[in-house]
Amino acid sequence: MAKSLRSKWKRKMRAEKRKKNAPKELARLKQALSLDKKGEAVMADVEEIATVVPASKVKKQADVNMAEVEGDDGKMDMDSKRNKTTLLDENGQYPSWMSQRQAKKLKGRRMAKKGGQGKKKKGLSW
């Protein structure tokens, strides 16, 4: 697709805009990354582009997260009352992620094992 005159024109104009804005963008990036006398980047310019978070806050947050993970047993919270072969829970419900088609297929297999024939199909009886 994307071969119509309109899309070609839009692509051309986006390229022109990139050419026009490239020097401004490059200057802004250089200014944001330039080092002042202290050896740190100018944060006022960087804050316009991205959210600035102090390193100490990030380290503390990482330490807290690691402590929580170490305290865990490493097991996921799963629905333990679900039958592994039929995937039914105690109320006879299939998981929410399962589509109706999959549930119907599993039910058909379960009924076939249970009662031999299962549900009769509609159609002519010859």
Image (cartoon, rainbow, N blue to C red):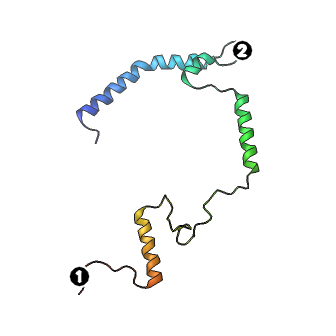
Write the residue at 39% across / 84% down: 117
Q: Amino acid at mark 1?
A: Leu
The quadrant the N terminus occupies is: top left
Please state which of the two labelled residues, at mark 2 or mark 1, is closer to the viewer: 1
Q: Measuring from the top left, give residue 67's x and y in whole percent.
A: 76, 44
Q: Measuring from the top left, give residue 59's x and y in whole percent.
A: 73, 34
**Callout 1: SS:** loop
Q: Amino acid at mark 2?
A: Lys
Give the mark, 2 or 1, whose residue is nearer the N terminus. 2
The crowd level at tag 1 (other Cα within 10 Å; few <14, some 14-19, many 20+) is few
Write the residue at 40% across / 81% down: 118
Q: Which residue is mark 2?
A: 38
Can you name the residue that lies furthest to the front here?
91
In the foreground, 7 or 76: 76
Q: Is residue 124 above or below residue 84?
A: below
Write the residue at 32% across / 25% down: 13
In the foreground, 95 or 66: 95
The answer to which image quadrant residue 10 occupies is top left
Count of numbered circles in the view? 2
Q: Which residue is mark 1?
A: 124
